[in-house]
Every structure is written in structure tokens, then in C-alpha cells.
Amino acid sequence: MPTIKFNWFTVQLPPNSKINFCDALSKIPHKYSNGIPREQIATDWFALKDLSNSNNLITGQIVKIVMDEQPAISDIKSPTIEIKPIDMTPSQGICQETAFLYSPEFNVLMLQKRGEGVSVGCFQSLMRKICGVDWVRLSVLLDATSFEKYKRIRKMRSFEFSVANIKNPDIFLGQDQMLNSLTECSRKYGAINLSIKMTHGHKKGHLILENIKETIDILLNSPSTKKLKISGYSEDDIEIPLLNLIKDRMFSKFTASNKGRRIDMDDVMQKMRFEYSKKLSDLRLMFKDN
């Protein structure tokens, strides 16, 4: 039985947007009343199907259709292991389903993590197009314990991160002044891995909290970030030990049934709702002030 994994996010729309994400999703069936929403992103197509709003939870599946590859089959009992391409029409492609769940109550999203499925970037691009907004941004959600500790930090004592395999040196350009400088350094020296640690040493004082948090938000949502650790103090000068923000991201996983050789997506959708219910008490504590 396959293991199914989900990452958790909060959802942001432009500050000047006249609708929230719940409203945007609710308008989709009326906007695409003649069929299933589908959009092309790069060479692949993405379609939103089985969109449902039940018990104040919005669920659905995004089908990724790869148009520039042709699958083939072979037989392990064949003496020659003959490879036979599968014929497809020009409008057909290889598909992979990705499930999601959105809670309007907490503005959180569960998105299935699949190697060949829908990435965070593609989800954002697809929703931007079919919802008709300027942008949609998913921000990684920390688990309940780290979420509360991070919120309590008022003085940042240490900040450490590493970024690996930066094939594109412009990955952070235009997002943050400090990260802009680092990408300039990586370009100048031909580096693809970067590691930075900032502290106030043994002297009294602390790092600039607002600036550090802006950078953390970018790093936490970048797949290139491999390490992201911070420590600090609360408003009452109570020490908040080292937080590992990469390790402490909220996630869910469970086993699902197969239907033939494929994952039973009906089973995934049902168990996804159950996983959400298991996090309800944490979510209520995390967002009690909202």
C-alpha cells in the first residue's frame, strides 16, 4: 500500500483583492460551467476536477497531463525485453492526480506531495489563472509547537541557514536585500551551495527581528533551502531554544489503497479529510486570535 504525504500551507492573495481564496474557489464552477477548468503551464496541462464544498471544507484534485513524453511498456518474461510505445492522440498525455483540501475557517491548505505530481509553484500558477487574481501564494505552515514558539520570539539571537544546488543564481533576486547580495556572491564565485550563520556573539543585544522574519518567510518557502534554524527570547526574556524550521514544518502521511496498479484517489480523498480532523485541535490553538 502506497504512503501518501501532504504538506500544509496558509494561502495569501493580493492585499487589494476583492475576494478571498474561499470565494475564488466557490466561483470556479460558475466560471467554467461548460466543463472542467484546464490551463497550460509551460509544456504541461493542468485540470481541476471533483471540486467539492462540504462541511466547510473545499476539496478537489488537480490532474497534471504531461504532453511531451510517450510512455512505453515491456514484458519481464520477454526474452528480448521488447519496448512497445503506447500510441496516443495529439490531445492525450500522461496524467498524475494530486489531491488538496482547503479550510476557509483557518485559511489553511493541505496539498498532496507527489514526485511527478503538482508542485507548489504549479498549484499557485493554476489557481492564479482559474481564479482570476494577480497572484496566489502558499506559505509553509509550521507544526503547532514550533508555530507557537516562533510567534513568541521578540528578540532574535541566532539565525542560520543553508541553500543547496542553486542551479539558477537569480533564484532569490528581487525578493530580499540580503538574499540579493548572496546571489550576487554565488554568481561571482561560481558557488551553488551557500551557508550562513548570524549571531550577536557573547555580547548583549539581538538581531533585527523584522528583517530576519522577512528573510525566513522567503527561505521557508524555497525548495532550495536545506537548513533553517533560529533561536531567541520571548517578550519576558524567556529563552526560546533552537528551532529547526525545515524539520518542524507541518505534514501528514497515511497509507492508501490501490485500485489496480494506480492509487485509489477516492480512498485518498476520504483519508485526507480524516487527517485534517486530527489536526483540528492544533489549528484552533494556532489561529485562536484570528
Image (cartoon, rainbow, N blue to C red):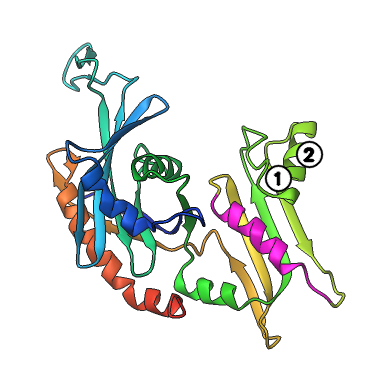
Residue 139's spot in the image, x, y percent? Answer: 49, 56
Please identify the quarter of the rendering in which residue 77 is found: top left
Instruction: Give the side of residue 239 with respect to residue 119, left or right.
Output: right
User: Image point 70% across, 45% down: which residue?
Assistant: 194
User: Are dots 2 and 1 in contact, CB under 8 Å?
Assistant: yes
User: Image point 68% across, 77% down: which residue?
Assistant: 154
Q: CA distance from mark 2 to mark 1?
A: 9 Å
Type of secondary structure dominating the magenta stretch: helix
Residue 263's spot in the image, x, y percent? Answer: 20, 44
Neighbor class of circle 2 (other Cα within 10 Å; few <14, some 14-19, many 20+) is: some
Residue 124 against residue 6 in the figure, above or below: above
Residue 143's spot in the image, x, y percent? Answer: 46, 68
Q: Nearer the viewer, residue 61 or 274?
A: 61
Quarter holding the C terminus is bottom left
- The residue that disc 1 covers is 194
Residue 42 against residue 62 in the figure, above or below: above
Asked whether residue 71 is in view, the answer is yes
- The residue that disc 2 covers is 185
Q: Nearer the viewer, residue 14 or 232?
A: 14
